[in-house]
Image (cartoon, rainbow, N blue to C red):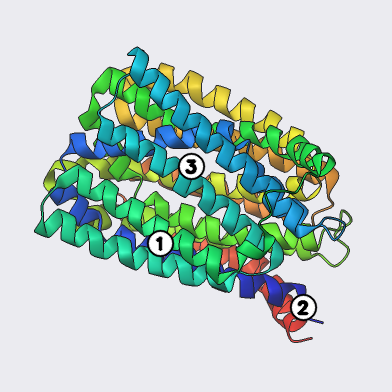
Amino acid sequence: MKSKYLTLFENMGLFFIASFIPKTISFFLVPLYTRCLTTEDYGTADLLFNTVQLVSPFLTLQIQDAVLRFSMDIKCDKSEVFSNGLSITLKGGLLIILLSIVLEATGIFSLPIGYCVFFIITYFTGALTNIFSYFCRGIGKIKILTVSSIVGTVVTVILNLFLLSVLKIGLSGYLIANAIGQLISIIIIYFGATLYKYTNIKIKNYMLKKEMLFFSIPMIFSAISWWINNASDRYILTYFAGLSSVGIYAVSSKIPTIISTLGSVVSRAHSISAIKDLDIEDKDGFLGKSYALISGCSVLACSFLIIMNVFLSELLFSEDFFVAWHYVPPLLVAALMGQLSGSCENLLSSLKKTKLIAVTAISAALVNTVLNFALIPHFGAYGAAIATMVAFSSQWVLRFVVVKKLIRLKNNTIIEVSTYFILLFQMIIAYWGNRFIAIEILLFVSLVGLYIKSEIPVFKKIIAKMRL
């Protein structure tokens, strides 16, 4: 029988290839974007994608979360689970098409036809990607996700280079490249994972659908909270500072994307293990040790990127966007806390405690909204970054407290919280760029020292168990 740890690390490796490597390739396209797009173009694209992320949870009812959870339930028929999820997703797509036509025809809300088309395409590609990939995770077909992600990224990169650098069609080229790349990825997943074998529109298991919706609907609040914490500040910034400021702020999030992407890699693997190997007593320490490992790696990555912030900004951002370095440190900490919060969400989801996920998500969203309106008028984009950081931190605190009450996690909470405060101090002095970089390096070394003392013995035990 394969070790729990070996399965976890194998899945992390596959998700790393599928997500982190393609995102890293895209990350190094930032100089191309900042050279070929104006700050207003970048702000417009950012608002378009973030608006889709806002409406998608309502249209899909976050059914992909139920698809993952129920596809791993041996009591459920996998074809029924997948077909129910796909049906709800497609109905949401039809609704957004009808709504767009009505809004355009009545003149209530009018967009250039091109943006409207891209809006609809972005919904379908994003929603179908979620359904397909979550189901593949549930049935263990992870390798095809790796292939589809790499191919989709390569297509996107090639099209961006051609449309932006050769044809020079700016924002339209950027949107076309991203849409085609994701569409290619969807086609590969559907046929490569033989998802057509699980597709049956005639399935009418209403009891299963009701149970899936009962699970997924509270997750809407988690998704909206994520959107509020990550994207709502763009709209408030637009009001107080204009699209140019939004474009610069959007670029500042590119470096924290490293943490977010690394976090998504770990979260996807962890979500499978959390469901498959759930043990509220944590008798073998697997849940606690895996959480500690996630926390330690994320903290060290965050600390290192804060040190490298100004250098990376000089390398990646053009002159018009260089000021974005200022907002990176708090957004890095926000990404870290979002990752830790997501790990707690995986554990709560495995327990089917989605209502608790919703309550903690709403609380964090309220914190973020209040702070955005309080800070952005006075501190601009930096205020938005601080609001995001505080919101994700509060969400992690609430979820971690709840998880510790429900599951006896065997982790060293004192050491972990201490590292978060060290990181917070590093973020504060990073406000002045590289002026105190020597202190930042010492803080990074101290973090490494703490983890060597507390986590290396744990890591050795994990290695030993992987060999069994």
Q: Which residue is mark 3?
A: 334
Please tell me whether mark 1 sits on a helix, a strand or a loop: helix
What label does residue 59 carry, if any? Answer: none
Relative to residue 366, is residue 142 depicted above or below?
below
When asked about the image quadrant of residue 324, the answer is top left
Disc 1 residue crowd, few under 14, some 14–19, many 20+, Cα 10 Å: some
Q: Position of residue 231 (x, y in %)?
A: 42, 33
Q: Residue at x 32, y 60 (%)?
A: 26
Relative to residue 418, is residue 468 depicted above or below?
below
Q: Is residue 59 left or right of residue 375?
A: right
- On-image quarter of the N terminus: bottom right
Q: Are marks 3 and 2 in contact (CB under 8 Å)?
A: no
Q: Which residue is mark 1?
A: 184
Q: Is residue 224 left or right of residue 149?
A: right
Q: Nearer the viewer, mark 3 or mark 2?
A: 2
User: How much space separates mark 1 and mark 2, taking CA atoms?
Assistant: 35 Å
Which is more N-terminal, label 3 or label 1?
1
Please tell me whether mark 3 sits on a helix, a strand or a loop: helix
**Can I make out residue 95 in this image?**
yes
Q: Residue at x 74, y 37 (%)?
A: 213
**Can I make out residue 288 in this image?**
no
Q: Position of residue 155 (x, y in %)?
A: 32, 65
Tell which of 174 and 327 is nearer to you: 174
Q: Position of residue 237 (x, y in %)?
A: 32, 24
Q: Which residue is mark 2?
A: 3
**Kind of residue indicated by mark 1:** Ile
**Kind of residue indicated by mark 3:** Ala
User: How much space separates mark 3 and mark 2, taking CA atoms?
Assistant: 33 Å
**Kind of residue indicated by mark 2:** Ser
